[in-house]
């Protein structure tokens, strides 16, 4: 006997999964597994693991959207392939293209195309990031988040260190992390070193 099995997930424990659950039951799910406060980037979610254990060959797994089960494109592709090998169909209520039978040559080809597109997207993001950083460097800017150690905080940290205070104490007084203080002091020391003329 084949079953329609549902899986729902909410990102925080405060969110209510009832709307997802109702949609899945309306789609024919005889059992719905629900994870609360679990990230889709973590594969080992309690109810997701239970759902995978429950599924049998010939079953259909119905979800509201792919992001409920997979936090990355690679995870999604691996999931679709794994379910296909097990003879389980995957159906998304909001993404009609996800009703794929990967046991057929056409279904496997579709998954292959998805994998290529995912790799292309990652490569494009990396290339755009590389170009953006190179352009920023050419303009005299560096990438990354601004440091929490403003010039004023750095000056205060240098003064407190000269008075014999520890990194941990300085960080506590300034309300920043010890690693931020250490990096700022190291840079201040480096900037203060006299340059030697050849």
Image (cartoon, rainbow, N blue to C red):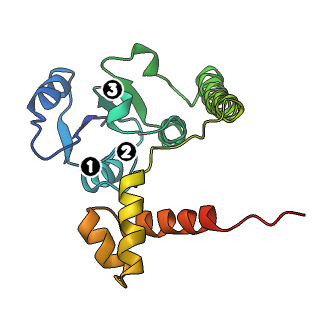
Q: Residue at x 65, y 32 (%)?
A: 119
Q: Which is more N-terminal, label 3 or label 2?
A: 2
C-alpha span from label 2 to label 1: 24 Å
Quadrant of the rendered image containing residue 187? bottom right
C-alpha span from label 1 to label 3: 16 Å
Q: Position of residue 156 (x, y in %)?
A: 35, 64
Q: Which residue is mark 2?
A: 56
- Can the viewer see residue 22 in this picture? yes
Q: Position of residue 86 (x, y in %)?
A: 49, 43
| Circles 1 and 3: CB atoms closer than 8 Å | no
Q: Circle 2 sits in a helix, a strand or a loop, which is it?
A: loop
Image quadrant in which the C terminus is located: bottom right
Q: Circle 1 sits in a helix, a strand or a loop, which is it?
A: loop
Q: Residue furthest top?
A: 96
Quadrant of the rendered image containing residue 171? bottom left
Q: Circle 3 sits in a helix, a strand or a loop, which is it?
A: loop
Q: Which is more N-terminal, label 1 or label 2?
A: 1
Q: Which residue is mark 3?
A: 65
Q: Residue furthest front?
A: 197
Please indicate whether residue 77 sits to the left or right of residue 172 in the image.
right
Q: Which residue is mark 1?
A: 38
C-alpha span from label 2 to label 3: 21 Å
Above or below for 85 versus 67? below
Above or below for 151 versus 169? above
Foreground mark, 2 or 3, reads 3
């Amino acid at each position: 006997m084949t079953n329609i099995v549902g899986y729902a997930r909410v990102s925080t424990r405060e969110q209510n999964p009832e709307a997802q659950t109702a949609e899945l039951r309306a789609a024919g799910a005889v059992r719905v597994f629900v994870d609360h406060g679990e990230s889709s980037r973590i594969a080992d979610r309690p109810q997701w693991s239970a759902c995978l254990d429950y599924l049998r060959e010939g079953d259909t797994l119905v979800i509201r959207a792919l992001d409920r089960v997979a936090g990355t494109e690679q995870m999604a592709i691996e999931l679709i392939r794994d379910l296909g090998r097990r003879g389980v169909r995957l159906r998304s209520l909001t993404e009609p293209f996800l009703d794929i039978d990967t046991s057929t040559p056409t279904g496997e080809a579709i998954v292959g195309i998805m994998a290529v597109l995912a790799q292309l997207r990652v490569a494009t993001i990396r290339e755009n990031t590389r170009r953006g950083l190179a352009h920023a460097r050419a303009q005299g800017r560096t990438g990354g988040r601004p440091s929490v150690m403003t010039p004023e905080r750095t000056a205060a940290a240098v003064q407190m260190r000269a008075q014999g205070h520890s990194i941990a104490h300085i960080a506590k007084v300034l309300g920043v992390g010890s690693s931020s203080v250490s990096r700022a002091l190291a840079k201040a020391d480096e900037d203060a070193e006299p340059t030697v003329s050849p």
